[in-house]
Image: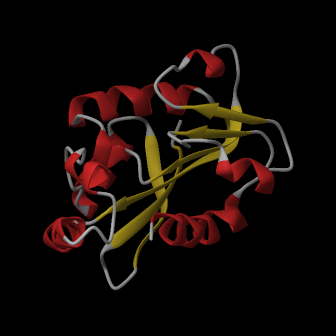
């Protein structure tokens, strides 16, 4: 099930991949095969993005695994790594998905440990606040998968 969900998220991001890409929280780098420019993968160790800038930053199903205050700090860093006209593309489950994901984890349909790691289910309002407080603006926002997931495309407002 996890691979199917990942493919679905990839399908959402592919039209927006351009230039040099930072895959933030990209696990094993499965997105790399779709990137035409330079590809940088960052999971827990952020040092690979030091001294680099990016045209596209991708954070697919990752912010829900990080403490809220840390997400704000990370996005401040990500914003500083964007090239002019660069974008940040993120997906995260909506609060509506929480009981469904927990039930699916109970039945072992999705990875139980992965769901247990969720620290926060972000609302649309919170994503707009995250953008605004990090000198970003929401270029596009959309819910998908029957409102259980959401995507936001952010660009610098500086």
Q: Is residue 89 above or below residue 48?
A: below
Q: Is residue 145 above or below residue 73?
A: below
Q: Name the residue: 53% across, 63% down.
A: 6
Q: Name the residue: 82% across, 36% down.
A: 38
Tell me: 154 left or right of 126: right
* Quarter of image, res 72: top left
Q: Residue lying farthest right?
A: 36
Q: Residue lying farthest bottom?
A: 146
Tell me: 19 left or right of 54: right
Q: How many marks?
A: 0
Q: Is residue 30 above or below residue 51?
A: below
Q: Nearer the viewer, residue 102 or 138?
A: 102
Coordinates of residue 8 in the picture (x, y in percent): 55, 73
Q: Name the residue: 13% across, 70% down.
A: 99
Coordinates of residue 124 in the picture (x, y in percent): 27, 63
Q: Nearer the viewer, residue 128 or 109?
A: 109
Q: Nearer the viewer, residue 51 or 63?
A: 63
Q: Is residue 4 above or below residue 31?
A: below
Coordinates of residue 90 in the picture (x, y in percent): 47, 54
* Quarter of image, res 53: top right
* Quarter of image, res 81: top right
Tell me: 4 left or right of 117: right
Quadrant that contains the N terminus = bottom left
Q: Name the residue: 23% across, 68% down.
A: 101
What's the coloring here?
secondary structure
């Amino acid at each position: 099930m996890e691979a199917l969900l990942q493919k679905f998220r990839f399908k959402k991001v592919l039209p927006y991949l351009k230039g040099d890409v930072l895959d933030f929280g990209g696990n094993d780098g499965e997105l790399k095969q779709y990137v035409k420019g330079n590809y940088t993968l960052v999971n827990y160790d952020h040092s690979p993005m030091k001294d680099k800038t990016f045209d596209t930053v991708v954070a697919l199903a990752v912010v829900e695994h990080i403490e809220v205050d840390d997400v704000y700090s990370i996005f401040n860093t990500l914003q500083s790594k964007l090239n002019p006209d660069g974008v940040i593309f993120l997906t995260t489950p909506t609060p509506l998905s929480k009981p469904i994901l927990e039930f699916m984890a109970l039945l072992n349909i999705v990875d139980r440990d992965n769901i247990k790691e969720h620290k926060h289910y972000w609302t649309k309002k919170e994503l707009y606040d995250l953008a605004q407080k990090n000198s970003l603006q929401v270029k596009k926002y959309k819910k998908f998968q029957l409102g259980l997931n959401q995507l936001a495309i952010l660009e610098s407002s500086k």
